[in-house]
């Protein structure tokens, strides 16, 4: 899988140059199996060999990040809070009230999650969708996405330049980092599901007690 991605990115950069890096990062936002942890260090290494301008690679990569983020933002905006509430009412354990609580949380902390989310695998792309659902201010969303993505892209491209032929070390380290992040996310999901199940059980018990008290009157 990794070898095929590397070969595809190499052919893309050979054909299009720096814009190929931007296209790869744009697609990475929409299809997470294309990892920026591979694309960007490889672009840095390629630029160190003189086959690619490092600044052009950085600019195109950041443009691809921002473009992909806005596409996902508009997907979230198209879904909208009302449709999300209807979906929540239909789903097991989840309620429309949960959507309202999440949106209130996003109103309060969303700007930081958009910024710091750019450094977290799995979250980096998806954070744009709730921003769109919440209709976060476009200028603020764009600036936070631009700054966060620029830092991430510069760091990985710089590592590729610095490590040279050992650029794949970055992706190996990022794999370990991603494993820890995914484990924490899985734990958080399990805790959330446990909370929702417990909440549903408590509400059933209260409803049963209320029905019982009504029949005894």
Image: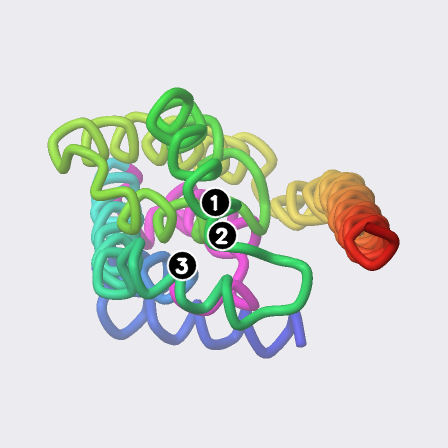
Sequence order check, earlier mark of 3 and 1:
3
Q: Residue at x 52, y 34 (%)?
A: 119
Magenta: main secondary structure equals helix
Residue 190 seen in the current view: no
| Residue 145 relative to residue 43: left or right | left
- Residue 73 % position (x, y): 26, 53
Residue drawn at x 50%, y 62% is 88
The 10 Å Cα crowd at callout 3, few under 14, some 14 to 19, many 20 or more, is: some
User: Where does the magenta region start and end?
Assistant: 30-54
Looking at marks 2 and 3 on the same chain, the residue that comes earlier in the sequence is marked by 2
- Tell us which disc is closer to us: 3 or 1: 3
Q: Quadrant of residue 115?
A: top left
Q: Is residue 165 magenta?
A: no
Is residue 199 left or right of 60 when viewed as pictured? right
Looking at the image, residue 127 sits to the left or right of residue 95; the answer is left
| Residue 67 visible | yes
Are the residues tagged 2 and 3 within 8 Å (C-beta)?
no
Residue at x 60%, y 35% (from the top left corner):
163
Q: Mark 1 sits on what residue?
A: 124
Work out how far the residue at label 2 is from the one at label 3, CA to CA, in angstroms.
Answer: 33 Å
Q: Quarter holding the N terminus?
A: bottom right
User: Residue 85's mark?
Assistant: 3
Scheme of image coloration: rainbow
**What residue did someone put label 2 on?**
36
- Checking the image for residue 106, the label placed there is none
Secondary element type, mark 2: helix
Residue 96: % across, % down? 46, 53
**Nearer to us in this view, 70 or 175:** 70
Task: Decide which of 131, 201 is in the foreground and name it.
Answer: 201
Closer to the observer: label 2 or label 3? 3
Q: Earlier in the sequence, mark 2 or mark 1?
A: 2
């Amino acid at each position: 899988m990794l070898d095929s991605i590397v070969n595809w990115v190499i052919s893309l950069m050979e054909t299009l140059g720096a814009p190929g890096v931007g296209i790869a990062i744009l697609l990475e936002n929409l299809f997470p199996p294309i990892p920026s942890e591979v694309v960007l260090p490889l672009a840095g290494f390629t630029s160190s060999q003189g086959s690619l301008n490092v600044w052009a690679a950085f600019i195109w990569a950041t443009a691809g990040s921002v473009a992909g983020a806005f596409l996902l933002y508009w997907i979230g905006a198209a879904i909208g809070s009302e449709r999300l509430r209807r979906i929540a009412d239909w789903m097991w354990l989840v309620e429309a009230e949960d959507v309202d609580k999440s949106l209130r949380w996003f109103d309060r902390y969303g700007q930081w999650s958009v910024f710091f989310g750019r450094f977290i695998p799995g979250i980096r792309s998806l954070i744009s969708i709730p921003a769109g659902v919440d209709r976060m201010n476009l200028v603020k969303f764009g600036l936070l996405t631009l700054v966060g993505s620029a830092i991430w892209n510069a760091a990985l491209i710089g590592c590729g330049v610095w490590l040279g032929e050992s650029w794949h070390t970055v992706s190996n380290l990022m794999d370990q980092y991603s494993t820890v992040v995914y484990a924490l996310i899985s734990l958080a999901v399990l805790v959330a599901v446990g909370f929702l199940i417990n909440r549903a059980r408590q509400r059933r018990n209260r409803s049963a007690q209320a029905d019982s008290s009504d029949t005894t009157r």
